[in-house]
Amino acid sequence: MLRKEDWMEIKKLAEKGVYKKDIAEELGVYPKTVTRALARGRAPSGERPNARCSKLDPFKPFIDYLLSRLRQPI
């Protein structure tokens, strides 16, 4: 996944006229990644749009409660 700094570097090098292949080689990513980043037109948001919830999400408050009880001195 690209960081915002990587996207800014891609944009800067593309504006200078550097080939996508050379940009990809410099950043250590595939040329298709550079193409997608330029097509997106903005820095990545950092959020995964289709991220699924964990199966443990309904139980996390209870787990936290149990762990807090274990940490208390007897």
Image (spheres, grey):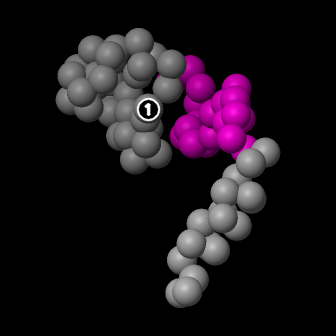
- Residue at point 30%, 23% (across, down): 29
- Residue at point 40%, 22% (across, down): 34
Q: Kindly tell me whether residue 12 is visible in this rendering.
A: no
- Residue at point 60%, 66% (across, down): 67
User: Left of 59 or right of it: where is 16?
Assistant: left
Start-end of magenta stretch: 38-57
Q: In the picture, residue 9 is in which quadrant?
A: top left
Along the line of sight, which residue is nearer the eye, 16 or 41? 41
User: Left of 43 or right of it: where is 35?
Assistant: left
Q: In the picture, residue 46 is in which quadrant?
A: top right
Identify the element where label 1 is drawn. Answer: loop
Name which residue type carries label 1: Met
Q: Kindly tell me whether residue 50 is visible in this rendering.
A: yes
- Residue at point 70%, 67% (across, down): 65
- Tell me: residue 42, above or below residue 62: above
42 drawn magenta: yes
Q: Residues within 10 Å of mark 1 (few under 14, many from 20)?
A: few
- State the residue position of label 1: 1
Q: Quadrant of the N terminus?
A: top left
Q: In the picture, residue 52 is in which quadrant?
A: top right
User: Left of 29 or right of it: where is 63?
Assistant: right
Q: Position of residue 35 (x, y in %)?
A: 45, 17
Along the line of sight, which residue is nearer the eye, 12 or 50? 50
Considering the whole magenta stretch, tell me its main secondary structure. Answer: loop
- Tell me: residue 54, above or below residue 25: below
